Each structure stands twice: as C-alpha cells, then as structure tokens.
Image: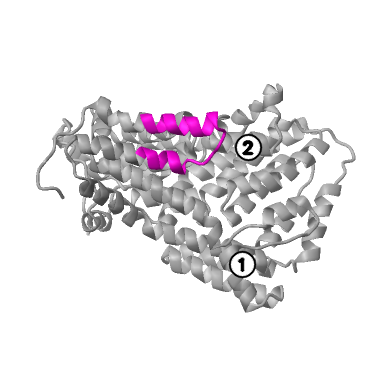
Amino acid sequence: MTATKRALPSLPLALTPVILTLLVLALQLFYFGDFTPHVPLAIGLAITGLVGLKLGFKWIDIEKGVFHVIHVSLPSVSVLITVGMIIGVWIASGTVPTLIYYGLVMLSPQIFLAAAMILCSVVSLSLGTSWGTVGTVGLALMGIGAGFGIPVYWTAGAVVSGAFFGDKISPLSDTTNLAPAVTGTNVFSHIKNMMPTTIPAMLIALAIYLAAGYAVIETGNVSFARIDSITAALQANFYISPLLLLPALLVIILAIKKMPPIPSLFAGVVAGGLTAMLAQGSGLHDIFGYANSGYSIKSGVAEIDSLLNRGGIQSMMWTISLVLIALGFGGALERTGCLETIINTIIARVRTFAGIQTAAIGTSMATNLVAGDPYLSIALPGRMYAPVYRGMGYSTLNLSRAIEEGGTLISPLIPWNAGGAFVISALALGVADGNLQNLLYIPLAFACWLSPVFGVIYANIGVFSPRATEEERREWKESGEAVADLGAQGWNVEEAEAARPVATA
C-alpha cells in the first residue's frame, strides 16, 4: 500500500505498455518465427516500469506489485513441478503406454473420427499436453485417417477437438494450472467448474463425428499396419495391463474427494513410482531420474519415441519461467494502475455479469488473435478482470473458465497463433503449399468453439455462474487481492449490491 493515492493513467498511456508489448511479441512470433514469448514479456515489464516511473511511482512500489502477483501464483508453480514428476513417472510405470494401447486397439473405420477424438482426449488428459498429443498420436491418426479415405480436415478437426479438450481438463496441463493461478482459484475446483461447458461441447462433437464417420468413409479393406506397429512397440517395451491405470485412478479419487492438489498429485507420483518398480522392473534411482529429467526410450517406432520421451521437473522450467514473467508483467500493469484504467473503460460500457463474462472470453480471444500466444491470452485477461468479478461478488472460477475457453481452446483455431501454427505444421496440413481447404479443420474442431458458446449462453441465462462463497471472500481479504469498487466506477450501487452473494447459514 502506498502512502498517497495517485491519479490513474489516461487510457492512451495505460494502453502504451500493452500495445508496445504486443508489437514486440508480434516481431518475435511472426517476423523471427520464434514462438518463445519470454523476452518480449520481460521487455513489456520494463516498459510498464518506465510508465510507472513517469506516473510518479518508485521502482520499489512497482517491484512489490510484481512480486505480489508472483507470490500468489506459487502454489500453481508447485503444481507444475509435481506435474513434471508425474508425467515422467507415469510413462515409466506403464500407465500412459497402457492408455495409448487400449485407445488404439478400439479403432475401427466407421467410428474412427469419434474414436480419434476420444483417444486424443485420453492421451492429452493423461499427459497434460495438447501439443504433444497432436504431434505424436495426432500425426499417427492423420495417416490412419488417410488410409480410411477420410478428408484430412475432418481427421484434423477430431484430433484438435480431443487433444485440446483433454488438455483443458487435465490437472497436469500448464494452461489448466495457469488459469487458476492468475485468478486465485483451486485447480480441481477450476476443472469441475469447466464441466458444464466442456461436457455438452464434447457430446455434440462426438455425435457429429459419429454421424460423419458413416457419411464420409468408404467401406473396404483398410491396412492397420501403422496401428499394429505402434501397439506392438508398446507391448515390446512395457508390461500392459488395466491394473497399471491405478495411479491415475488414485489421483481422480483424491480429486473427487476434494483433497489439496499438490498432495493428491504427489500421491500419484509415489503410486506411479511403486508401479514402475513392481510392474516394469525399474530401480529406485531410475524413478528419481524419471521424476527429475523425464523418461527416455528408443523403441524404433518414431511415434512412440516422440510421445514418450518427455516429463520430469526440468521439462516444466520453460513453462514455469514463462508463467513467472507473464504474471510479473500483469502485476506491474496492476500496480501502476494501467489495468484499472483499461478495466474502468470496459465496465463503463458493460454493467452486467453476462457482459463481463462475455468480455473476458472475448478479450482472451482477441489476445490470441493479436499476440499469437495462448499463455498471454490467459495471464493478461485473468489479471485484468479478477477485481471486477470480486467487486460483483461472483466467484473468479467464472473468470478462470472464461479465459480457458477464449485462451486454450481458441488458440489452435487461429493459424498465426502459436497453437494454430503448431497444429498446421505437426499435422502436415500443407496450408503454406496452397492446400487452403485444409483450414476447414477450424470449423470442424467443434469442441473448441462450442465450449465458449455455451459459456456465453450460461452467463446470459444465469446458470452455472457461481457466486463467491464467504470462504472465497475471506481468502481475497487475507491475500490482499484487489476488489473493484463498482460504485466508484459509475455503476448503479443497488445493481452492484444485487449482484453480490447472499450469505447463507
């Protein structure tokens, strides 16, 4: 807290660090072709610091804002570290290979599209990586789909729907941990709150893929050689059994029982380590290595090697460093009043929860479009809108869901976004070679764009939009989180108060 109340920056000045940062990001992403936003965001933090100095702040004030936001995010950083361990150990235990194996053997031509979506969902859920799923299992499925005579864009749509759905609801995913980190919520509560939009979107997508499967696939003999080579490699290198799914089942049970995320996930690490020792013959020192540096395999099958050579604490350092820098940038914008000015401009025109929820989704989408970075599309709107939700008395779980829908799910649908560029490249869609018809995967990735549609509908009809509990409000106060004074922003005070939750016994 500063001794004097400083005037807020003007809108042009408040937008200056945001616009300049986006320009530097655009230079990095599009001109240099380097999808590494760390340094541009660090430059953005420096630009925000200069704006703060111009406004009369001392560096120590700005620094406090930066480290306050980083401090709030440390529990989620701890989750990411644990996630790195669990990925490496679960691969070694055979848990992940078993999931892939049973997913592949379920495939058949007419249900291929639906099965491809489900398989990608399972793999992405178990690994917490949509990109890893797209680039490995997804690429294998593209070849299988071509063998079935399915148009490339249909297969790509199913792969993207499944991969990013699984990523969105996986407690192992970096974006799924980033969203609650920037909004101050719990990762398991965040996942639970996404179900009302995610499940209907996936069911509709599943129904469409099932119907399309019977409409677009020619009957006839199809070679399953690629599937056979993958499943054979899995069996040759791992003991495969449904019993190996027990570590994943344990984490699911602990999540359902609402146990804290870090102990729950670490229990999964321990269970995976014991399983690796008992079922796969790994030694204790091997388990330590998998948890720190990830798993390594040379099976001779490219898809298997690419998918399973991953995990470990060190694999998360790229994401963790990005999270810390992005949140520090958001903290500097918040402390200097730039975010407050931008938010005030928005809420001066939007006076309802439905409007704010729609604006949050739209801002995440716009950041994806302009900045081309899915992480920034989650981190920046999350810090921008959180005080408004608190001021309205709504749980910030609504916000964490909104920025996942506009951030994680829309990223692969924008060709110049990091997510979209990766999808086009990894699935060999050949858009740069003039195969523009393959961009039809964008509308055919039904689960990705239906989820935010449901989010907007729910906000407008007032369902699945939880109010803040007394416990949440107490946590806001204890952690010093900003709460917007809506009356001071020109809102009708009675309307603002009506939006607040009613305390119940």
Return the residue nearer the eye: 495 or 481.
Answer: 481
Asked if labels 2 and 1 touch by Cβ distance under 8 angstroms, the answer is no
The image shows residue 91, relative to residue 324, as above or below, that is below
Q: Where are the magenta residues, as a range?
A: 20-44
The picture places residue 394, in percent across and down from the top left corner, at 29, 45
Name which residue lies at 45% across and 36% down: 406
Q: Secondary structure at mark 1?
A: helix
For disc 2, the marked residue is 423
Check if residue 270 falls in the magenta segment.
no
Q: Secondary structure at mark 2?
A: helix
The numbered disc on residue 290 is: 1
The picture places residue 313, in percent across and down from the top left corner, at 53, 62
Name which residue lies at 40% across and 37% down: 458
Occupied quadrant, residue 151: top right
The image shows residue 118, relative to residue 257, as above or below, that is above
Check if residue 24 falls in the magenta segment.
yes
Task: Indicate the quadrant containing the C terminus: top left, top right, bottom left or bottom right.
Answer: bottom left
The residue type indicated by label 2 comes to Val
Residue furthest left as drawn: 4
Name which residue lies at 27% across and 31% down: 14
Mark 1 and mark 2 lie on one chain; the one further toward the N terminus is: 1
Query: Cα distance, mark 1 to mark 2?
Result: 28 Å
Occupied quadrant, residue 240: bottom right
The picture places residue 134, in percent across and down from the top left corner, at 65, 44
| Neighbour tally class for label 2: few under 14, some 14-19, many 20 plus, Cα within 10 Å | many
